[in-house]
Image (tube, rainbow, N blue to C red):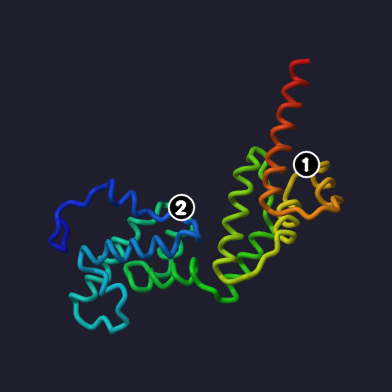
Amino acid sequence: MSSTGYGPRSNAKLQRLLFDGDETKYELWEERLLGYLQTIKLKKTILSSAPLEEEGDKAKNEESYAELIQLLDGRPTSLSLVMRDAAGDGRKALKILRDHYASQGKPRIIALYTELTLLEKGTSETVTDYLIRAERSIMALKNAKETLSDGLVIAMILKGLPDSYKSFVVHITQSTSEITFAIFKSQLKSFEETEKFNVSQRLIK
């Protein structure tokens, strides 16, 4: 039984509450987190701004930290953020996560733009995985109220493609017709499939 007086927690339930580091899902995750903390009498503690003067309050704050870190899936970013600067402090840990994943402040926005401009497709990475990484940064910027045109997004993704995609890059950049991001993604995936087919045919010969 936990120190809150409740019985053993279901691993399956905790699994559903894990945060995977996807910024676009942070607000929903925090809502589920607070709902869970409410059931174990820790929501008021983690949200309060009152001084932690009583030993019982300090203990509850430490417990809220222990509960919170169990709901981070272990990826370096989320866990290392709170481990370094808020160990044992549930209130501070939640604030750090909010500032990192849900803030609309200038430092975070600059970091997201930098991440997007430095994006590069890995050698063994599929186009689908590459686009997913790009879209995470794009959605995070849009959630921060930034306006990104399809043309700008397409240009950033094209820049990160390897030399083997040169003919595709040329085709897109020299095209005179308007192209949406959705169409661009479809064309990029089709190009990858065509290239795989051509390589397989050369190997057969």
Circle 2 sits in a helix, a strand or a loop, which is it?
A: loop
Circle 1 sits in a helix, a strand or a loop, which is it?
A: helix
Residue 117 image-quadrant placement: bottom right
The N terminus - image quarter: bottom left
| Label annotation for residue 165 | 1
Residue 19 higher or lower than 141, as above or below: above
Residue 80 higher or lower than 133, as above or below: below
Residue 164 image-quadrant placement: top right
> What's under tag 2, amino acid-wise?
Arg
- The picture places residue 193, in percent across and down from the top left corner, at 69, 33
Whether residue 177 sits left or right of residue 14 in the image: it is: right
Nearer to the camera, 13 or 187: 187
Nearer to the camera, 184 or 78: 184
Mark 2 vs 1, N-terminal side: 2
Whether residue 136 sits left or right of residue 48 in the image: it is: right
Residue 47 higher or lower than 165, as above or below: below
> Which residue corresponds to the image point at 49% horizontal and 66% vertical from the top-left?
101
The C terminus - image quarter: top right
Whether residue 53 sits left or right of residue 205 in the image: it is: left
Give the foreground label among 2 and 1.
1
- The picture places residue 37, in percent across and down from the top left corner, at 26, 65
> Which residue corresponds to the image point at 12% horizontal and 61% vertical from the top-left?
5
| Label annotation for residue 75 | 2
> Which residue corresponds to the image point at 72% horizontal and 23% vertical from the top-left?
200
- The picture places residue 94, in percent across and down from the top left corner, at 38, 69
> Which residue corresponds to the image point at 16% horizontal and 62% vertical from the top-left?
3
Residue 186 higher or lower than 2, as above or below: above
- The picture places residue 157, in percent across and down from the top left corner, at 71, 53
